Amino acid sequence: MSEKTKRRPHSIMRFNIWGYIFLVPFFVVFIIFQFIPLCSTIYYSFFEYYRAGLKEVGPNFVGLQNYIEIIKNGDLLYYFRNTMIMWVAGFIPQILVSLLLAAWFSDPSLHIKGKKFFQCVIYMPNLIMASAFAMLFFTLFAKTGPINSIYVDTLVWCSKHFPFLQPVFDFLHLQPEAVDFLANVHWTRGLVAFMNFLMWFGNTTILLLAGMLGIDTSLFEAAEVDGATATQIFFRISLPILRPILIYVVITSLIGGIQMYDVPQILTGNSGNPLVHGHLTSMTLIMFLNQNLYSKNYGLGGALSVYLFVITAILSLIVFRLNTKKDND
């Protein structure tokens, strides 16, 4: 063995050291800003620790009492249900529209002009802050907002110029009065879902489009030669190959949905209204957590954070297993 060959492993080890050196900043930031706060949150979740006015109570060790109290109240499950309803209502149209647009943009036979321009346009809402989006819709759908003005003016004009439509308006219970959209459960949840759809469908489209453009075109050509239709090609070739990206999109969207906060918080003025049967119908899990942190109830806030961590992990694992089950069969 030559002297050059003997030295090669040592030179490779010295070269690899630089990779570990570049990883040090990441681990330092992760430990300081994520791992230590995570451990602190779990630690204080076992303590009675809150503020009553200017008086600080605790920390007094109470074991699992905070976890039991959250479950007994029933608020966790109800607000989890709220969060999932608004996430599903926004995610289903998001993934359907994104798949459709990605299929159109990646199909060379359609000869779509200005594809790059449209791809930029549909991605632009993702660049707008969620708080700005929420303020915009809050202004649009307020009782004195432009949507109500257009609605009232249109009904008045139609009643004046087309009086035969009045029985139709009466049957549909349409009155020339401002509608309080944010006092209606379905409208409030629907607006939150619609805003999440608008903000994220462009990002999902770009991800799916990148996956479709990476598919070998010879597969499509062979399928066309065999007489496969465009629908069959999409469901038999494109979707199975896109499964890893779809898993990524579903899991990341699910995590983002569970962390939903800024849109419903601003749209409802941090109230979670409307109130129905003693429950806030647009209150999300993070809004519920924020209430405990705002009131300085660190024990309950820590326990709720642990619940959120466990729920997110379990749901992500379920989605991952369901989407990879076919590969294992």
Image (cartoon, rainbow, N blue to C red):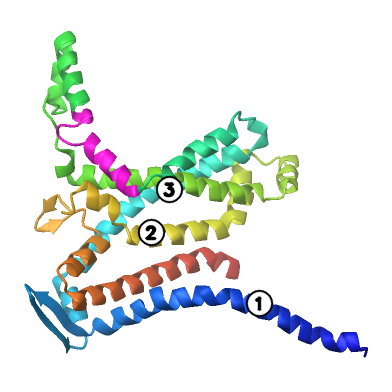
Q: Residues within 10 Å of mark 3 (few under 14, many from 20)?
A: many
Instruction: In the rendered view, tell whether residue 201 sits above or below residue 24.
Output: above
Quarter-wise, where is residue 188 in the image?
A: top left
Instruction: Identify residue for label 1.
Output: 18
In this picture, residue 26 sits left or right of residue 80: right
In this picture, residue 274 sits left or right of residue 207: left
Identify the amino acid type marked 2: Gly
| Residue at 58%, 54% in the rendered image | 242
Q: Is residue 86 magenta?
A: no
Marks 1 and 2 in Cβ contact (< 8 Å): no
| Residue at 12%, 52% in the rendered image | 275
Q: Secondary structure at mark 3?
A: helix
Q: Position of residue 33 (x, y in %)?
A: 39, 73
Q: Position of residue 81 (x, y in %)?
A: 26, 60
Identify the amino acid type marked 1: Trp
Label 3 to label 1: alpha-carbon separation = 37 Å
Extent of the magenta region: 130-148
Identify the amino acid type marked 3: Trp
Quarter-wise, where is residue 174 in the image?
A: top left
Q: Position of residue 294 (x, y in %)?
A: 18, 66
Marks 3 and 2 in Cβ contact (< 8 Å): yes
Counting residues from the N terminus, which is met first, the one under dot 1 or under dot 2? 1
Instruction: Identify residue for label 2.
Output: 256
The answer to whether residue 293 of the structure is visible from this angle is yes
Counting residues from the N terminus, which is met first, the one under dot 3 or under dot 1? 1
Q: Which mark is residue 200?
A: 3
Q: Position of residue 64 (x, y in %)?
A: 21, 85
Quarter-wise, where is residue 32 in the image?
A: bottom left
The answer to whether residue 329 of the structure is visible from this angle is no
